[in-house]
Every structure is written in structure tokens, then in C-alpha cells.
Image (cartoon, rainbow, N blue to C red):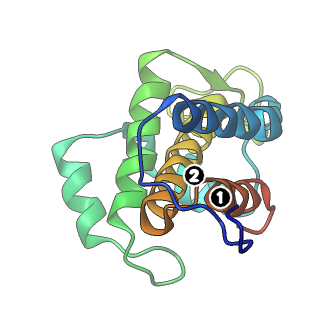
Amino acid sequence: MDVRGNMERRPFAWDRTTWALVAILMLAIGAIFGRVTKCGLVDWDDGTYVYSNPQVREGLTWDNVQWAWGQKSQGGYWIPMTWMSLELDGTISRAIGKGEPQAMQVAGRLPDAPPPLPDALVYHVHNILLHMAAAALLFLFLYRATNLRWPAMVVTFLWAIHPLR
């Protein structure tokens, strides 16, 4: 602060403090939301968006990208980037060969039974990484727009950890 009590405005700089704040923000988000990696899929909308959706389960292919750009969500929203993100998760989940047993399947799957549920870990880790990237971009935008590093960090941190963000 200066003599008048005004916040000191320094020009935006990629210095050690800026890097450290971004790293602290990433670590805080990982610590707070990392517990979700132990959770599975839920039966709220994961059925519609993930495990009952053949395009998402099949993964990111050219046909599924075209489907994503022409499809609306269950709420009638046009969300092609969300669909493609979920398809990418499906591709990664299939590539690493992970899956959980489907609760409604009988033991000893029939040949025409659907494949096991995708591994929820892939979907959760991807969402945490996206949230980290969004928080870093918000911090950098606010810092660059205001030249006030610490207020930008406080606002970003509150946004990043708030459960209704």
C-alpha cells in the first residue's frame, strides 16, 4: 500500500510469486477435490451422459464428434464441447482397460450384455484438471486486468473452492 492507503498496482509479470500462487492454487484444488477420485459414477445424470450413452462409451471418433455437434443434452442444451470431453474420457477409459462392474448386471455376463461401466477415476481426474486450468486462467485474467495480484488470488481461490461454483 502507498501512503494514501491505495493498493500498489504493479504491472503484470511472470515472476516467482505469480508462479508460486498458481502452484498453490493447483495444490489447493487437488487437495480439496482430490477425494472425488475415490467416488464412482452416480445415477443422477451419469447414466444419460456416460454409462448409457454409446457415443461416450465408444470414445472420441470422427462419427462421435459429428454426433456431438448435432446432439442436444437431456435438458435441450447444445453442448458439443461437453460431449467431446466425455468422449475423450471414454477413449482414455477404454485405452487403459478400466471398468467397474455394472450394478444391474447379473454375475456371469451374457455375450450381448453391455460392457462394464467406464472407470469413474478417468472422468473425475479430467474434471479436476479442467477445474485447475479454469482457476489458473481466472487468476491470470484478474491479475492482468487489475494489476492487483493478491485480490485476484483471493477472488480466484474463493471461486475455486466454493461448492456452488
- Exactly how many numbered labels are in the figure? 2
| Mark 1 surroundings within 10 Å by alpha-carbon count, few (fewer than 14), some (14 through 19), many (20 or more) | many
- From the viewer's side, name the closer residue of 99 and 85: 85
Res. 157 image quadrant: bottom right
Observer able to see residue 164: yes
Are the two marked residues, 2 and 1, in contact with CB atoms closer than 8 angstroms? yes
Give percent across and percent down for residue 60: 30, 40
The residue carrying mark 1 is 156
Distance, label 2 to label 1, CA atoms, is: 6 Å
Among all residues in the image, which is located at the extreme front?
Answer: 3
Q: Of label 2 and label 1, which has the lower sequence position?
A: 2
| Mark 2 surroundings within 10 Å by alpha-carbon count, few (fewer than 14), some (14 through 19), many (20 or more) | many
Among all residues in the image, which is located at the extreme bottom?
Answer: 76
- Examine the rendered structure and indicate whether residue 70 appears above or below residue 139: below
Callout 2 amino acid: Ala
Lateral position of residue 136 relative to residue 11, left or right: right
Give percent across and percent down for residue 70: 24, 71
Res. 121 image quadrant: top right
- Examine the rendered structure and indicate whether residue 121 appears above or below residue 63: above
Task: Identify the residue shown where x is 41% and y is 43%.
Answer: 13
Work out which quarter of the rendered image holds the C terminus and state it. bottom right
Work out which quarter of the rendered image holds the N terminus and state it. bottom right
Task: Identify the residue shown where x is 45% and y is 36%.
Answer: 90
The kind of secondary structure element at disc 1 is helix
The residue carrying mark 2 is 135
Give percent across and percent down for residue 28: 75, 37
Task: Identify the residue shown where x is 53% and y is 62%.
Answer: 9
Nearer the observer, disc 2 or disc 1?
A: 1
